[in-house]
Amino acid sequence: MPFGTKPGVDGRPIHFDAIFAEVIQPALIEAGCAVMRADGEQRAGNIRTDMFQELLLADLVVAELTLDNPNVWYELGVRHALRARGMIALQSGRGHLPFDVGPDRTLAYALKDGRPDPDRLTADKAALVTMVKATMAAWHGRKVSPVYHLLPNLQEPDWRSLRVGDVNEYWQKLETWQDRVEVARQRGRPGDVLVLAGEMPTRVLRLEALRTAGKALMRLRSFRFALEVFEQALVLEPKDLACRQQKGLALERLDRHEEARQWLQAVARDHPENGETLGLIGRTYKDEWAARWRRDGVAAPQRREEAIWEEARLHEAARAYSAAFRADPLGFYPGINAVTLGWLWQELTGQRDLELDVPAMVHGVRWAASCRLRRDSNDYWARASLAELEVLEVLAADNTTVQRAYKSAAAVANNDWFALDSSKQQLQLLRDLGIRPELVGAAIEVLEREQARTSAGNPKLEPERVVLFSGHMIDKPGRETARFPESKAAAAAEAIAAELDQLGVREGDLGLSQAACGGDLLFARACLARKMHLEVRLPKQEPEFLADSVSFADPRWQALYDEVKAHPGAAFFIMPDELGPAPAHVDVYERANLWMLYNALARGATRVRFLCLWDGQGGDGPGGTQHMFELVRRLSGRAPTVINPAHLPSTGS
């Protein structure tokens, strides 16, 4: 939009800054948007470069068309060329708009003496809020851009390919964010990934963020959370192929085989030549076949008999993987699955399928994996595929050869428990059917040793019970209405201890909380007294946190904080160190509550219990105990156990 004051068509001044401040900005904020004005760029550098990035990546562009301003028309044209949707036009006093944009979403508003008309201001803002919400809700409906509307086969450019310049705020944010997600994955912290997944500012970046986060959660074996993340991504872009595929894989890993297969078959109908989708369909048949003969209490000979009885599903799996490999001959991952399952089907049934042509696929996998390693010598899956061929080769030399191949793959696994486990599962199929037991056992030994060095994703390391706590601080001096005075601390400590005992916590269970004076530190002390592990998660750097949440109270609280911190059973995490600084639109205390809750739920929702010290009233600011209570109800469906300080007796200080 124009900036400052400009003469209207009748020569009288129009105050565009007032229009922005009184109509456009408040309406967009009310509709849930973060607002950036085109002429408001104050950063050093090429303003046009930043402008093009904003026009490419912004969820919504609002164009003020009251005047025929060349800059505005040019910027609107750029947006129309780059994006099919996400545009609104405003104007005041124009009888008509130019032909090319006349049919578009346009809202008229009222001016009086060159400023927003006070008598119409409320109605005009409400109309803009409604239009913004409707435009965003109809993202996948009619194309707004006349360019894309009139050229229906025109595709939006891949935004990654339109990076302008070496340094740009959007790209820096995305790259920094991706680095933090990878660090969280390597540390085995799906809760951190979930928090980060919700913090990208625009739709296209959110979609990319959700893809990245979902894949990280899959590698951490947090399949339920991964499924939720991919479903969020598909709300943003229902046709996104990668997210559709990953949703199918998540359903499969949750043992929802038939549902996964139906979902993936729908994807395959839309993308019939996509090898990855065909391979995922093969995965559903493979896992369903294995589930039918792998049951507790079934002896090895009977397992083999039942595996042969169910051979039709194994055959379907091999054929699906083979089709995937043919669709993408460089796709060694479906290729090695086609080889292994096809070879296994032949071994179990004594039959041959000329369409599978396992010997030819062996050469194809070796070639494809070798080509990949020429481009990236540290590709785990390529090395693991070659190692698997060593197990299947009739002339495999000995255990040493097989172990050397798997050690080579494990060396570049990059702490990826999921990848190691995926390779091991393939070998366990052979082991459980008594196929080449010595070679298979040698390979599994390598993978299990490497997994033992990696905690990320290992379900055996999770505590049996997890208790998440949130509670009031001790009242600050001068508080008008008492909420949790010092005189009730002893009774609160007893109540918290009693609730933990009621839950049946024991050594090795986990407690999560912050460490403010009052409920947090009382909970922490009670956990450590019961030999529980304790995770203390601070929303700010320690000096600032202590000043805000501990030091104002009686010195004994600082002493208790120091005691908790020094305890070997307590681990402290500082949110800005783990997740980076909070985005401008995110409150740090609300972020901390989400961080604690996700890290609790990531241990398994059925393990988690929620305990809070809360008077049932609204908090003094965002991110308090009320916020945590509501988060728990919304995200887990469970009701926290509440200790109300108003019902506790007072004792002498």
Image: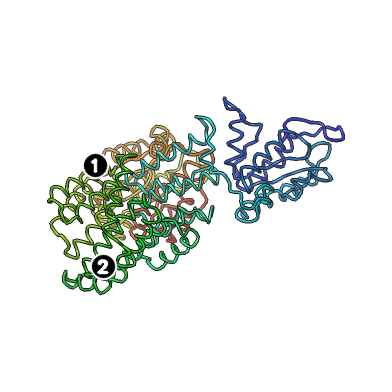
Alpha carbons under labels 1 and 2: distance apart: 36 Å
Q: Which residue is mark 1?
A: 411
Return the x and y of residue 192 as percentages of the image width and height. Answer: 39, 45
Of the residues tagged 1 and 2, which is closer to the observer?
Answer: 2
Q: Which residue is mark 2?
A: 352
Q: Give the answer, above or below, for where 342 lies relative to 534.
A: below
Return the x and y of residue 553 as percentages of the image width and height. Answer: 40, 37
Name the amino acid, label 1.
Answer: Ala
Quick one: label 1 or label 2, which is nearer the N terminus? Answer: 2
Return the x and y of residue 224 as percentages of the image width and height. Answer: 39, 58
Name the residue located 36 percent from the left edge and 54 percent from the top edge: 222
Compare residues 624 and 308 and report the one nearer the observer.
Answer: 308
Quadrant containing the C terminus is top left
Return the x and y of residue 335 as percentages of the image width and height. Answer: 32, 55
Compare residues 594 and 519 and report the one nearer the observer.
Answer: 594
Q: Is residue 3 left or right of residue 13?
A: left
Tag 1's secondary structure? loop
Which of the numbered marks, if any, corresponds to residue 400?
none
Q: Is residue 117 left or right of residue 499?
A: right
Tag 2's secondary structure? loop
Q: Is residue 634 visible?
A: yes
Q: Is residue 604 left or right of residue 439?
A: right
